[in-house]
Structures are given as structure tokens and as C-alpha cells.
Image: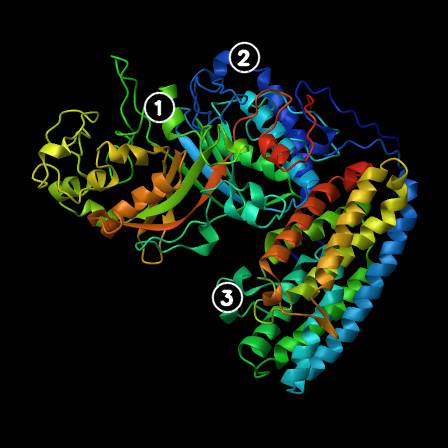
Amino acid sequence: MKLKFALAASLFALTAAALPQAASAEVSPLDLVQPIADYKIYVSENAEKLVTDTKAFTDAVKAGDVDKAKSLFGSTRMSYEAIEPIAELFSDLDGSIDSRADDHEKAEKDPEFTGFHRIEYGLFAENSTKDLEPFADKLMADVTELNKRITDLTLPPEKVVGGAAVLMEEVAATKISGEEDRYSHTDLWDFKANFDGSRKIFDLVRPLIEKDDSAFVTKVSGNFDAVDATLAKYKTADGYQLYEKLTEDDRAVLAAKVNTLAEDLSTLRGKLGLN
Amino acid sequence: MTKNDKGLITNRRNILLGVGAAGSAFVAALNRAPAAVNQGAQVTDAPVSDKTQERQPFYGKHQAGIVTPRPAAGMIASFHVLAKTPAEVERLFRTISERIAFLMAGGTPPAFDDKLPPADSGLLGPVVPPDNLTMTVSLGSSFFDQRDWLLPHKPVRLSRMKASPNDALDADLCHGDLALQISSNTPDTNIHALRDILKNLPDLMVLRWKQEGSVPVLPPKPNGTHESARNFLGFRDGSANPDANDAALMDKIVWVSEGGDEPAWTRGGTYQAVRIIRNFVERWDRTPLGEQERIIGRKKATGAPFGGTTEHDVPEYSKDSEGKVTPLDAHIRMANMRTAASNANLILRRPFNYSNGVSKSGQLEQGLLFICYQADLEKGFITVQRQLDGEPLEEYIKPIGGGFFFTPPGPLDETDFVGRTLLEATGHAVTRIKS
């Protein structure tokens, strides 16, 4: 399958820089086989790690060790956040693992509010593991089930490639504000995982577009680098500083990079000839 | 995330695409149906306007949207600017000018392969109508303060808006590095323009806040005269505005001119003051008419000052020094004493009414998106506001947001862009080429 992108003649003064450029990449579906296979390994490794980390996290919750559970919260979520576009394919599990209080009518008091953020609420807002055991068991069962389903899943190429942009849309719409981890304020861990997950997809397909559209590749990787440099300012020995430490200027930088990456990566599927 | 189904979520996008394809076929079939079948207006037909081709010029000594008659719909959008270096700021100014030039002229956006996101949101259809759109670019104090190389060129009177005694400013509705005033005949045209800017400048600007507004539309008067629009207090607002058709007057009141202490690059520009002023409308509506009129200083029905018959009559305060005709603390009297000296404080107002929803107390969140322009911000808005501090109207209004900005001169022609004179003043070489 060969694609030709035609830029219709514009009657108006528009610079190419002002608009997403139409690529003339010629990509065959076969070219995508290896990147997709590699991505499957990446997803599986993250799903395995999620199971291992969640075991340690939920064990700490069940043992009543508030401090240990708190210290594991940010890092445990990272393997989930990195593969979120795939994890979200299973909407029942995504709801029970990663929904927020405001996804539910009765917010924190809603019996349907389960998963990471329900436990986060107990640990950080109430500083207690009281009554969290059923949620810990449910979370462990859910991530185990997620890992099993991912093992059996054939990854749809458009979902994989589209996932790079989806991760940026998630950050742009509901994370840049710090509302994701509102009790623990470990949002920068999530940011890092979301960006890494998006960059992984981009890096895997990058060889397919590099030749025809090197300006695009340079721009996108430059923006990923800028995000890494900004987040690196907040790195600590065992993770990241709290969201509150993020300065107004750095928040604006991240927001601009996220928006720009979302715009640019939204063309990735098209550039690879995927619907 | 959707929570209503088990297992694999359906590929919503593909379903939509599928529906889209089938839907197009369906529409095509409909289009072949005899027109007579569909003669009567349908409930979802688009409302009709004969003003969608109204066009304002983008190029000129001054930016559009200042002395341009105010259309029905307006918006202020405030941005955090990420462009730091002269080259980045030039790219920002050029790109925003190119987008404004296209949007104000209207036309057909480029078509991309349908595997790519479209160039335009499409919300106004495949051909973008101008619809009387103007987009006015203004720069906040922080735009200069945060760039060492711009600081020596900051307009002399540009400051960060300070709270007046009656203000309750919300930090999330204040200030900004760059403000866009967008106005046109319809709110949708403004929203389309804003989305175009956001899509084309994601790496250089981040939206901080915006406020939309509107003014009530009137039928044309048979004798061709005009009336000032009413605000949400029900009073005519703008009766005493200086005549924007009087170029000499505008040179004095609105435009920064030669010979002053302002940097040369600002000539032809103006200061913009924006205030989001909440009105306590329920309480206002429960206030006796006579008291409302004494607080404002005008008759509500006609807009005439006390002792006058039309809104354009000029009150004679010199013959009313005790305030027996117009109370001394009436809004219009405190704002403008109408003396030779007070002429130095004239401003050109261009406000819109806004309505945002309901407060936690169940009251309407609405008021005035106040916008005014003046050649001297200190003698203009800042002085007028100081005169108004403590006025009786304060019981019914609460400024909650806004900011001060400088509006650079207009782009002269297609080789020019908004902000060019500032960049040149810094010594940054700018090439005048048609983009």
C-alpha cells in the first residue's frame, strides 16, 4: 500500500510551519510488524512489573504499613501509566484500577470508587490503611487479570501508533493540572511514565519516517528531550518531588510541550498510512 | 475512559468513521431528493445572517478591533507566552499575524489527506466566512519583564494591574503575557478563531484564561441613527464614548503619538485595560428604579442624563455644583467630570456583557467584560478607576479579573506583522517579505 499526501494548493498566505505538514512517507503494513512486536514486549514487561510492584504495594497496605505503602504508590503506578493506551482497551479494568473520585456520582464515598486512587485517598487523605484491605485485594486481582488479558491480546497497529498521541491527550486534558494524584501529589511520576510510554512508541516507528520526514522526527524528539529536561529538575533520589513544587513557568513549559506533542503525534497514524 | 461495557472497548473512532462514511452516503441520497420536499424551515436549520461576508481590514497603521464598531460577540483570551528569544518571538508574531490575516479575510483552509487531522476545526464549514472578525493582539507587562532584551523597550506606562479597593481579583482570571481580543458577529466565529490560534501556536503560547461576552442586538432605526447598547444592569453603556470616527480625536485619546516619552516603536499603538466586573444582578433588579438611576446618573429607559432627553445630551455639572440634578456620586459624574481638565482622562470603551453560570449561592455569575483603550493608561483607565473608588455602584459590582496590556501598532501590509516595530527597536533584524 502506498500513500500519497497531497497538499491542496492554498490561496492564502500560510507558511508550511504554521500547519501540520503532509508527509510523503511510503510505509507498507509489513514495515509495522517488527515495531508492533517490539511494543508488545514493552507492554508485557510493564504489565509484569505492574503485577510485581502492585503485590508489594498491596501487601504493605494489608500489613497496615502506611509509610511503606505511601512510598510505593508513585513508583507502582508508573508501569500502568506507561502502557495506558493499551490498558485502557479493557475499560472495565481501567475503571476499577484507575478511575478517579470524580468519575463517580458519590465521589470518594461511592462504592464503585476502587483501585489506585481509592487506596491513595485512604493513605494520603486519611493517613490510614483502615478498611483498605478489600480495595487492595481487588486491585491485585485486577492487575493480575489485566496482565493475563494483555498476554492474549493482539495489538491493533492503529491503537499502538495512536497511543503515542493518546498519552499526550491524557496529560493535556486531565493531568497537567495535578488532579490525577490529588491526594498524594505524585503526578510527576505519572507524567514521566506517560511521556516515556509515548516516546517508546515514537522511537519504535521512528525509522519508518526518519528518511522522508526528518524535520518532524527532529521536532518531536526535541520536544521529548525538553520535557525530560524539565522533569529532571524535579528528580529526587527515589523518584520525583510533589506536584506543588512545579513552578508556574515549568508548568507552562510542560503544557506547551504536551500540546505540541499532541498536535504533532496526532499525525503519526496518518504518516504511517494507518486509519 | 468509558465504564459501561466489559472487556475490549469498541474502537470508538472507527465506529464514528464508519458512521461518517455511511452518513455521507445518506446525506448524498438526501441531496438528490426533490427540493420541494424540504421547503419549510426545519428546527435544526442554521439561523440565517446576511452579515457573514462582512470583512474588516487587518493591515493598517493601527490594529483592527479598537475603533472598529463593536459587533455582537466578543472575547478576551489571555496567554502565557513561551517564546523567549528574539527569533522565537518573531516566529510567534509572524505566525499569529498570518493566522489573523487568514481568519479576518476568510477563505478555504488547505485540504490534507484524510488520514491526517484536518487543518481547520471545520466548525464554520469548509469555507471560513470572515463574519466581521477582528483579532487584536496586546502584550502584558510580564511579556517585557521576563525578557531582559525587551525590558528597555517596555511602554513607559505599562504596569501589572493592581487591585482597587472594591476588587476581589481571582489570580486565575488576571494578567497574562499576551491578550487576544476577538470580536465578530457571532460567538461561534470567535471560538473558531481561538481554536485556530491554539492549534497553530501550541509550542509558543498556553491559554491561561478567557472570557466571552456579547451585546444585545437592536433593529436598525428608520432614521439611521444609532443607540448605545445596554449592559446587564439594563443601562445604556457608552453614551459618552468619544467619537471613534473622528481621527484627530482618536489620535489624541487612543493612539500613542510622536513627541511623548513613549518609545518610538509604540506609535500607532494603544493601551488596553481589561476588567471582568461581576454584577450582582438579582440585587440590582430588587433596587428601586429611581435609586438605580441616581446611582448611574442617567434615566434608564432613554439613557439621557438628568435634565436631558437623549443619551447624547451632555450634563451641565457646572450649573449643578451641589448635585441637585445629577448626584455628585453618580457613576457617570465620578467617571467623567466633563471639565477641560477631565478631557485628559477620556478613554474609548468597547465592552461586552458576560454570563458564566451560577455561583455557589445560586446567583447568576454575570457582568461586564470591560475593555477600554487609551493613549495614556495612567491618565486614562487608572485615573478614572481611582475617581470611581467608593462610588455607590460598588455595592452592586465586584471586579474579579482582567489585566493591563499594550496593543502594538498595526501591520502595514502583507510584508509586515504585529510586533515588528518592537523587534526592530531591540536591534533584531527583521526581513520584510511577503509570507
Bin the neighbour count of mark 2 within 10 Å (Cα to Cα): few under 14, some 14-19, many 20 and up: few
SS type, badge 2: loop
Q: Does B173 sit left or right of A1 as displayed? A: left
Amino acid beneath label 1: Leu
Tell me the chain of label 2. Answer: B
Labels 3 and 2 touching (C-beta < 8 A): no
Tell me the chain of label 1. Answer: B
> Which mark lies nearer to you, 1 or 2?
1
Label 3 in the same subunit as label 2:
no
Amino acid beneath label 2: Pro
Residue A203 in the image: x percent, y percent? 85, 50
Q: Residue at x 50, y 66 (%)?
A: A107
Query: Residue A107, labelled with which disc?
Result: 3
Q: Residue at x 31, y 34 (%)?
A: B344
Tell me the chain of label 3. Answer: A
Q: Which residue is mark 1?
A: B249
Residue A54 in the image: x percent, y percent? 73, 74
In the depicted structure, whether residue B305 falls above or below residue B173: above
The CA span between labels 3 and 1 is 59 Å
Q: Does B204 sit left or right of B69 as displayed? A: right
Label 3 in the same subunit as label 1:
no
Q: Which residue is mark 2?
A: B34
SS type, badge 1: helix
Label 1 in the same subunit as label 2:
yes
Residue A156 in the image: x percent, y percent? 80, 48
In the depicted structure, whether residue A243 falls above or below residue A21: below
